[in-house]
Image: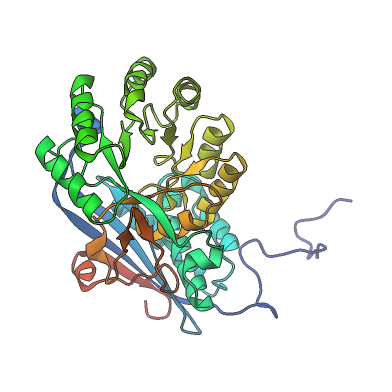
Amino acid sequence: MKISLTENVSLPHNRQLAGLAPGPATQDSIATIELSLVMLPLSEAISDAKVLMGRQKPLTEVAMLFAEITSREGHTGLGFSYSKRAGGRGLYAHAREIAGALLGEDPNDISRLWDKLVWAGASVGRSGLATQAIAAFDNALWDMKAKRAGLPLAKLLGARRDAVPCYNTSGGFLSTPLEKLLENCSSSVANGIGGIKIKVGQTDPMIDLARLEAVRNHLGDQVSLMIDANQQWDRTTAQRIGRVLERLNLVWIEEPLDAYDVEGHAMLAAQLDTPIASGEMLTSVAEHRALIEANAVDFIQPDAGRVGGITQFLKIASAAEQKYLKLAPHFAMEIHIHLAAAYAHESWVEHFDWLSPLFNEQLETSEGTMIVPARPGLGFSLSAQARSWTADSCSVGPRS
């Protein structure tokens, strides 16, 4: 039977693709959205292997995209995503264009709303900047949902632990002199952090090895040690250095190769005793699934801010769980502490103190772990300092 596009046709079980008409199960609706672009300055310029290779400039600030969502019943949610070096204003611009698609929607329908947002900007793709902009909204909706339930997000998701092993990265960059690096390591351990990640990728690998041996001798064998090459080795270099580093008993070697070299990571994972970790630079579920299905990593490292938010992160975690992979989310500990606490297998959370000035509340570390906060939702509110660093902002909704 042919159907004329001009006829008024009612199809069985038809639903509006852009949204659902309010029904008996509708609980609330989104009333207003506040968007802000906050430029977070770092106390000193940061360099890793990408800077040494001339691929990027030193990092001096982090662009933070915040979404503050309020419902008609007065529930609120705070979410964020971010960009380093470039792209922050692009995130803000895309978020501002698509935000109106959420108005009037039930904030509880998070997965459907993710789809609605990604289709609103589908012309620019379903990964990269587009999904990173969506992440701020998605994370805010999960924050609201957990607050509405009166639960920390980890508990809403079904926490498996109340504390997660944590490691520090922010004290171990290549731009950090060795003496200061050792001081940072001692300070982290004294503050209850259980592991230290050191950046590597010098043009002379012997410099990396000397720094690592100094750190291992300084900390002893009881403190967990990881390294991060930030994608700067080729396959041969990674194989050779990986074999030399076996004796240091590293928890993992992170991003030894280009983030999209799935085959190369799989080869390394099969050849080396030291576990391989990667995933932080990927911006979609599909890209992470490729790593997982190829047995290319022992630790998967998704970033909720990059993959499109908690909704997409949970899909990655589910796929990783079925492969019995370990989980070590990248950056944004304020979000990832909850997600790591709900993961079925071994998980770590990355301690970065960079974002601390943005929030009134702080996370606690003790005996090598980060404590899951007992506050409802993600458990954070924006500080006055964050407001003062706002470079641009807008309101979407009745107040706009």
Q: Is residue 34 visible?
A: yes
Q: Is residue 139 left or right of residue 37?
A: right
- Residue at point 55% right, 36% down? 292
Whole-percent x and y of residue 134? 45, 57
Can you say which quadrant of the picture contains the C terminus?
Answer: bottom left
Q: Is residue 98 visible?
A: no
- Colour setting: rainbow
Whole-percent x and y of residue 261? 45, 26
- Residue at point 44% right, 57% down? 135
When the figure is inspected, residue 369 is found, relative to residue 363, above or below; the finding is above
Instruction: Give the camera-side residue of 389 and 224.
Output: 224
Q: Is residue 171 left or right of residue 350?
A: left
Whole-percent x and y of residue 276? 43, 31
Instruction: Give the camera-side residue of 235 and 73.
Output: 235
Q: Is residue 384 left or right of residue 347?
A: left
When the figure is inspected, residue 241 is found, relative to residue 74, above or below; the finding is above
In this view, the residue farthest toward the right is 1
